[in-house]
Amino acid sequence: MKNQPSPTLQNDRADILDVIRGFAILGIFMDNLFAFTGWGFFSQTQREAVSTWPADGVLGLLELIFVHGKFYSIFSLLFGIGFSIILIRNEQKGINPLKIFFRRLFILLLIGSIHLFLLWDGDILFLYALLGFLLPLFRNCSDKTLLTWAAILIVSPLLIDSVKVIFHFKTGAFLEKIAQGIDKKTGVPIDETFSKYLFSEGSGWQEWRNWLSSGWAYRYAYLLESNRAMKVLGIFLIGFYVGRKMIYANLQENNSLFKKLLKWGLIIGIPSNIIMAYFEINNPGIQKPLGLVNTFFTIGVIPLSLAYVSGICLLWLRSDGASKWKILAPVGRMALTNYLMQTILGIVIFYGVGFGLGGNIGPALFLPIGLTIYSFQVIYSNWWFRYFNYGPLEWVWRQLTYGKRLSILKTKA
């Protein structure tokens, strides 16, 4: 009987990957809250006017150093590992894995498009799907070549930023002009008041739609300007290498590797991120501050991300996969559902279209709200998998990917 492609069953899943994914969802939400609440767009004067300042300033600094960019990097690593799993599992069955992979990516691209253009401009799924189509180009590379390409892609922003400083140009300038043109038509302000546009009294559906009309262009102008595509693709390749070497499935054998990554990730990552935060916050009158921000972001983010992952793996080994860590696995198993749920809750709670709590509160208030929401997701996700095989959106995604009916309900023994 001919082998048929099928999604990974629960018994075949590596719990550690789901735990790391569940941990990453927390960090991503903490980072995104700075956008949902408008805090990331506030001027320094607006921030200091909030009643919880200066505690907000301290929390914002800590977020910039220890959270910002690190958890999307972890997700990028997991994306590359996922690609390797699809390749290995299907090749072992004698099935062409690329057909499944491209179909899976196309559906993710559609989901990302809906998220980006209809819900929230801070989406990351669309970019992941686009860059994912490039991964098969590296399918037959040797391990050395794979890591070489990863290093080149990750370090390339340093050269690109140098060229931009020398020749005085912005890679995202054309998208900024498109966004500003859209704002001119819709009435979204381009001065300091734009940071309160979604949260001011009377703001509602129309303001949200106006914001989204140009949001995608601003978003991708920023992604181009910060060279995000090269960084993400480079981390994809590291993940592909990790998956190819089955490091996630042989944690004990790689114990010394995790200890080295934890040590050097902290040694390199923390000072680099502190310097990055300095240039981000103080903007000390240099010609191109974003270039220096990106430089230390590039140097510091990936080492700190790898340190986080290594720390989780070491804790997992120490506890022998005890249940206290597995509580995060269900959150990771339905990461797509939880990620989009965070968007919906963020809009409803903080935008004027909902409760309108954003625009007037700082991290001292909105971070605890985020932690409460995440705690709910942990409880909900653990409850869900008592009765179901897949998360709601994961079930839809897999059915469309594999083109067959999958049972979402668990069968009783």
Image (spheres, rainbow, N blue to C red):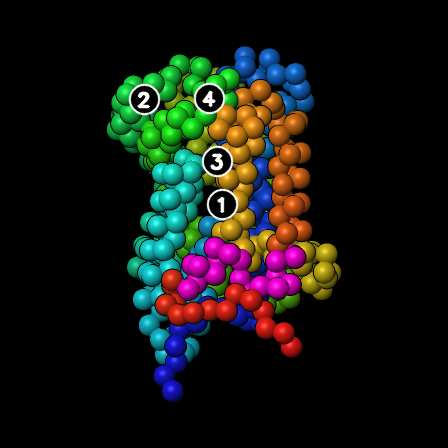
Q: Which residues are magenta?
A: 382-399
Disc 4 to disc 2, C-alpha distance: 14 Å
Q: Tag 4 or tag 1, which sits nearer the N-term?
A: 4
Pointer 1 residue: 340
Q: Crowding at label 3, few (<14), some or many (≥20) Cα neighbours within 10 Å? A: many
Pointer 2 residue: 186
Q: Is residue 132 above or below residue 29?
A: below
Pointer 4 residue: 203
The amino acid pointed to by label 1 is Leu
The one of 327 and 251 positioned closer to us in this rendering: 327
The amino acid pointed to by label 3 is Phe
Pointer 3 residue: 297
The amino acid pointed to by label 4 is Ser
SS at badge 1? helix
Q: Tag 1 or tag 3, which sits nearer the N-term?
A: 3
| Label 4 vs label 3, nearer the camera | 4
Whether pointer 3 and pointer 1 mark residues with C-beta atoms closer than 8 Å, the reply is: no
**What predominant SS class does the magenta segment belong to?**
helix
Disc 4 to disc 3, C-alpha distance: 35 Å
Q: Is residue 412 above or below residue 48?
A: below
The one of 284 and 6 positioned closer to us in this rendering: 6
Where is residue 144 shown, x and y percent of the image? 40, 61
Q: Tag 2 or tag 1, which sits nearer the N-term?
A: 2
Image quadrant containing the N terminus = bottom left
